[in-house]
Image (tube, grey):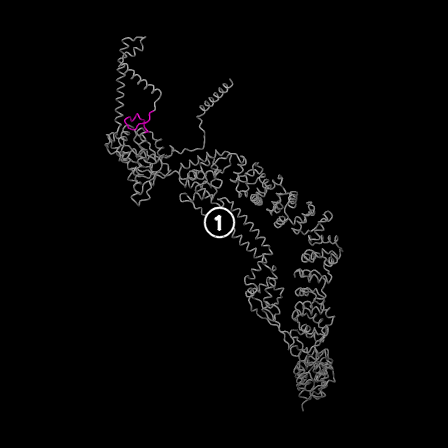
Amino acid sequence: MKKKLLNLLLNTSKKLEQLHFKLSKKNILELDYSSLSPINNGDEKNHYSNALKWAIDNRKEKDIKNIALTGTYGSGKSTIIKTFKNNYKGNDLKFLNISLASFKDEKPNTNDKNTDDKDKPIEKNKGELLNRIETSILQQIFYQEEDKKIPDSRFKQIKSYSNRKLFFIASCILLFLIALLNYFKPYLIQSIFKDYPLSTTTCNILHYANIIFIFSGFFFLIYKSIRVFSAITINKLKFQNAEIGLGESANKSILNHHLDEIIYFFSKTPYNVVFIEDLDRFQETEIFTKLREINLLLNKSKKIKNKNIVFIYAVRDDMFSDNERIKFFDFIIPVIPRINSSNSNAILLTKNENCNYGLTDNFIEDISFFIDDMRLLHNITNEFYLYKLKQEETPLIPDKLFAIITYKNIYPNDFVELSKNEGELYRIIDAKLTYSNKEIENLEEQIAILKSEIESLSLVKIKNINELRQLYIFRVLDTLTNFNSFIFNDKIISIDELLEDKNFEYLKNDKLFYKTAINNYYAHNIKYQNEIINTSFSQIENKVNPKKSYNIREQEILDIKSNKSDALRLEIQQLEKQKIIFRNLKISELLQSNRDINLNISEDFNSLFLTILLRNGYVAEDYFDYISLFHQGSVTRNDHKFIINVRNEQKLDFDYKLTKIDEIISKINPIDFNSEFILNYDLLDFILKNAIVNEIQLDFIFTKLKDESSTSIQFINGFIERTENLSLFIKTLCDYWINIWKHYVNNVSYSEEQLTKILKYIIEYANVSSIGEIEKESNLKNYLLHNLDILNIISDNDKLKSIITELDLKFIDLDFEKSPKDLLEFIHKNDHYKFNKNIVSKFMKKYGEFEQMSFDNSNYTAIKNSKSDNLIDYINTNIEDYVKNLYLDLDTNINEEQNNYLLLLNNSELNLKLKKDIINKVVTKIIDISLVENNDLALFILENNKIEPKWANLLFYFKNSEDKILDSTVNFINNIENARELSIIKIPTEIEGKNIYDIFCEELINKNEIENKAYDLITKSIPWGYTIPNISALNKQKISTLIRNYIFTPNIENYNYLKEPFEGLNIELLEKFKAEFSEKIDELHLDGNDLALILNSRVLNDFEKIKFLESCSDNVIISNIKNLNLISQLLLRDNSFDIDKKIIDKILLSDNISSSDRIKIFNKNIFDVDTIFIDEFLIKLGGNYEEITFKNKKAKIFNKPNNKALLNNLETKGYISSYSKNLLKLIINHKRKQ
């Protein structure tokens, strides 16, 4: 009972479903499919329809019987035909369609025409093809019409009868048989109904009815037999072994053979327009000839009552060559394609938007170029839509799905081969390794070159540029004789200076000279002269190393210093990674990276089409995902979705749940692990745990994570918060991402707390070597050094020690109270602190002796005396750093103890600039400059007045400058304080029995650049007097100073030496040594000028002047006019002075002597003059005195004592008779003439 009930319910359910379907089947599903058949609205403006209608309407008048619609394949010819038929509303045209679209394309091979043997099968194949085409046409003509409308046709169709008709025919036949039976056996039926006898009337009726049925039956049989026999054609008669052939139907074509059938068909049917499509696919023009002939016969047949039958052909443009087609057709209508490769993109863009395909515009532009047929486009979109629906939740990329379906439609056979891992497309994709190997070979060549460079650097023995330069300099010196020093632009360049870049360039460019030193044994001196270096630097290079030039060797040293070997090894590692990347590159990436790759595409395929599909990644290695459906098995649906998303470069959430991760990894191309789409928490955790077997994948993932993209950073931050493998993750991340700290510390979005956490993770989990690399790219070291609590950041002190050592941390300050003691001691012993006042003083207090004042004022001395051996050794090893950062930084550090001061200045580890900075800072003066080892530095000390003013120090500079007094020495002496100190100490005449100052003093005397005041001071210290010293450069004042300071010996040679160039200085020497020269008065050759100076001297007294005057001749005296004036003054002062009358006369008559002085002298010497001289004297006096000579005139002169004395003497001499006086004047009287 229960089973029956279940069956009842099941049947009821099915009935209800059928009822539901029946009621709702009219609601057609709206799906994005397109029909491939021609449409009936393809001629919007009816241009083609009007052309067709005109041709058909005028078929009789214009004799148009064969019309052609010509256009390219897929241009819409069938659509135009269908549109015309659909839109035509008249009754005069009846359309008959013939299409060979379903007929298999067959084209005879006509390529080989060399032999007659091959012509026969060609002709046979062609004939068979034509027969088959004609058979298809004939079948389509007759089988489009019902059999009853062409009853006389020999082509019979299978007849299908309804139940009612079958019942009717069976009843008629049965009645016919019964009638026959009853006719021949009339009592048979009566015997059947013997129990019910028939009346006579009934029997008569049956009898006549039988006759009617019998006649009717025989009439029907005869009628049908006539049609059957008329359709029988006898081709052969055979009697026993003889055979007779009737007619030649065997040699006729199918259409010709059945021409009567065709005429009969058109005579019985209303068709007058025949559309013939797809006939052009066979490229046989002969069939058109036959159809044209049949059309002609049809229209001329009298059986057909002027129907004017028109054949309309849909033909491709390239069907006929040249003008051949105009011979076949009476009217041609060209069809412009609706779609081609240039405009298919617009149609596809519209469908993409309307149907929401999800195709990108760029893809449409690329793919549409190869879609030039509307039916092809519709079929591709139909398949695309169906595939898309079938894939359901599988996240396929629409572009790639559409591309593979397009390929399927263009090359269906190769598509089938592709699913079997065969065919052209598969061959190209499978050959990817061949393409990548070429790139890998290039990388291997680069790696070989880099390895060669590393090997070359490893063989370099000299690893210091100065040592290398010394090697070349010594080779140059080997070629020079009597070498003293190098010269450039008259400037001496020492060996140390020649090591400098600028100076060494002079040597390389052959611009240096050298000074030779030649001993002159006879003159007991050294002769210096400049010479050219005859050996070129290129010759020196060949001597040192014929294989490598200096520049190459210098660059090798620079490369070693810059750790180029490490950089080259890193570059090799990168190239090795690129090799792995190239091995795993997708074929699209390979083609994009190298457009010269030749895919060797077969000529049967469009190479441009395949290249675009592959280069743009529309068809790739994951093609199986697009040609097959996913079935859950080795991976779950979620896993499969993740795989597809990775391949299609589509994101999923980082925490997207994965199940069978090992299978997922095996199904993903390793190169895809370098993309952001692979990032998944579960996946990375699995790879970290299984890093050994997933080494390549791990490398790619962390290479991606280090790119600092927002996606990578977001993933890293999220993964840190959730992973159970934090230490392994941080360790690996730091190995790859050396910019990790740089990113976090430079990003303002991270709080100090977050930075501290990241720093702790790096310090605690990262490899020490990785921390070192991170520091190179960031301020990690600076951040650590400014964190006073850094020694407590992790508990692993050994790890911290390793980090301190690796980073070479130099702490600025530390919390000595909270920091672990072993770390402090480690830092102190291993010099991991900077030189600054704060931390150095702390270490001195903790591990040595400390005195604040000494630390501040004499820092180096204080440290040397601190007994802190580690600190002292640290400073000695890093003296330059100490001087820069501590010694020079202390403002009060200006007094250094002499010995320690010299230790600093003579330290070879300090460069010259720092030493000069020390000298500028420290006020302590060098007592003995010879203790300073560097001559340049010694000179700088002199220039900055930082030496004690001692003659020994100045002599040191003199000897070091080839017995020349430097300008710096002059400047030092010009400091009046230095000159004063030097003047106190007499220059020793001998030291250890040797006179070492003589040349120095001679040069010092002749140094005119020394200021006069300083010159006067220092020359007092010169212990010698000189005969004719070299004073050619001196000015007169300095020579006068030498005279005053007894530098000139009082002899005639010096007197004469000073006389010519230095007027008056000889007299100054005479004045300085008057006693000595008085004794040598007879040796002196005084001239008028000398006498004038002597007479005018304030040093000599009148007695001494008279003594020198008496030694002079009158000519000498009167040779200088000044002498007369000076002698006149002497005469006026000393009455006892006896002088020649001739000189006195000269004085009295000199206009250069005042009248009053001459009158006084005249009055003293009146007795030695005569009247004539008196006249001459008075005239020379001029004025009123001249009037005295006028005898007839009373002259008047002023009433003065001298004038009174004059007149008294003239009266005594009888020159005047008398004179009188008034208040102001004296009046002269002369004797009257007798």
Amino acid type for the residue under numbered disc 1: Lys
The correct choice, above or below, for 588 with respect to 1228 in the image is above
Quadrant showing the C terminus: bottom right
Q: How many marks?
A: 1
Asked where in the image residue 164 lies, by quadrant, the reply is: top left
* Residue 418 appears in the figure: yes
Instruction: Tell me: 681 left or right of 227.
Output: right
| Mark 1: few/some/many CA within 10 Å (<14, 14-19, 20+) | few
In the rendered image, residue 741, in percent from the top left (x then y), is placed at 62, 46
Residue 601 percent across, percent down from the top left: 43, 45
| Residues in magenta, as a range | 143-159
Residue extending farthest bottom = 1234
Q: Nearer the viewer, residue 673 or 1033?
A: 673
Residue at numbered disc 1: 438
- Whether residue 399 appears in this view of the structure is no
Q: Is residue 196 left or right of residue 1080?
A: left
Q: Quadrant of residue 1158?
A: bottom right
Mark 1 lies on a secondary structure that is helix
Q: Position of residue 310 (x, y in %)?
A: 29, 33
For this rendering, which residue is in front, 1150 or 11?
A: 11
Vertical arrangement, residue 1124 with respect to residue 852, above or below: below
- Which is nearer the eye, 688 or 964? 688
Q: Position of residue 231 (x, y in %)?
A: 27, 27
Q: Is residue 43 magenta?
A: no
**Mostly what secondary structure, the magenta segment?**
loop
